[in-house]
Amino acid sequence: MILFRACLIGCIAFCSVVFASSATANDGARSAVAGDMCPDANVLAGIIDQVCWSCLLPVKIAGLGDSPEGSASSSPFCACFDEDLGLPEVGMPIGFFQPARIVSFSAKPYCMPSFGSRLSDDVTSLGNAGTADTQSVDDKSFFHYKYWTYPLMSMIQMFTNADCNNTSATTLDLMYFSEVDPLYNSDMLAFLMAPESIVFANAVAQSICTADCATLMAGGEIEQNFFCAGCAGNLYPLTGTSTTSDDDMVRNTELLTTRLLATLHRRGQAWLTMGNHMVSGSCEVQYAPTLPKTQYRSSMLFPVPEAQNTQVSFVDGANSSVGSVNEGNSVQVPNYQDNREVFDQKCCHKLGETTWKWGLNRTRPGNDAFVYLLYQWNDCCLR
């Protein structure tokens, strides 16, 4: 009897090991297939050469230096109230763009191209509500997003002053993803969060957005046009569906980046870190129900990093009838004028800036994933 029990226990243990090994192999195969479907931007490997370090400039110190519209005044002094002492502390104001967030887009649910992995096997089909309807329409596209905290300056221990840590993040972390957001897949549900969108769904608002795009192309910014996404289109509705007359995935993801930031500000998940309130009074961030567009800059990390030596040349149309794209992202565009102008692009751009300035030759055949690094302007008082 004892021998029989020992044999039975041995058989059960052997079968358990066999089935467990088989299940592990199947799970590994499914994971490998899922991983192959999601590209890897390898963000951490490009922390030096793929980051636009020039976007940290200009730095405004003691009121000296350039700054975007809506930033703190040019006073050489600042004063923040100390709750412990009950007295104001005088300091020196400083403002700069800080790399703070990463946003990735993919047409595949749960795909995380930032690190080449997936969140789940999508068993419940949660997050597929918006994709089936848009894939059958030629002039529509739909992308899911993953929103990460990316405190790069803290990670490399550069400029880590406690008075200027306005990003409220100290580690790399996934903050939000669209698959669990029912408002992201439905224009009607998104209207409940942004009812003002009905006011801007007309020809007058579209003409204002056209002027907003022209201002961006001329090098300016209009903070008051919060309902415009510059040359990318209209900000509303705040969903993942974009309706365009072309198949420019770079422009579509740029539009969705602006919509995402507007949504986070409306929900109180992103804060106003620029302005006089950061260098006076309590010197704390404030809630901004509308998007402060001038507070952000964007730089593509994947599939083609924007932080490359990109040169755009305008050549005489008599010498070149068509534009040509060379290796190293050097682009020649015909200009039917008698002059020749050569200029180097910056490796980051304003929200909604035309893709003709920064987005040429930044797609790859068969790729539907894009990753952007977001820079955030911080006003603070060093004391």
Image (tube, rainbow, N blue to C red):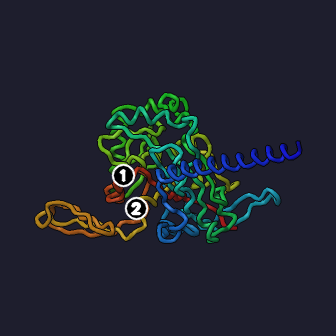
Question: Which numbered marker is on residue 230?
Answer: none
Of badges 1 and 2, nearer the viewer stands: 1
Q: Does residue 350 appear left or right of residue 266 in this picture?
A: left
- State the residue in front, 76 or 202: 202
Report if the CB atoms under discs 1 and 2 are less than 8 Å apart: no
Report which residue position mark 2 lands on: 304
Q: Quadrant of residue 316?
A: bottom left
Q: Which residue is mark 1?
A: 366
- Image position, residue 185 (x, y; %): 49, 34
Lower position in the chain sequence, tag 1 or tag 2? 2
* Viewport quadrant of the N terminus: top right
Residue located 48% across and 37% down the image: 239
C-alpha separation, residue under disc 1 versus residue under disc 2: 14 Å
Q: Position of residue 309 (x, y in %)?
A: 37, 71
Type of amino acid under label 1:
Gly
Residue 168: quadrant of the picture: bottom right
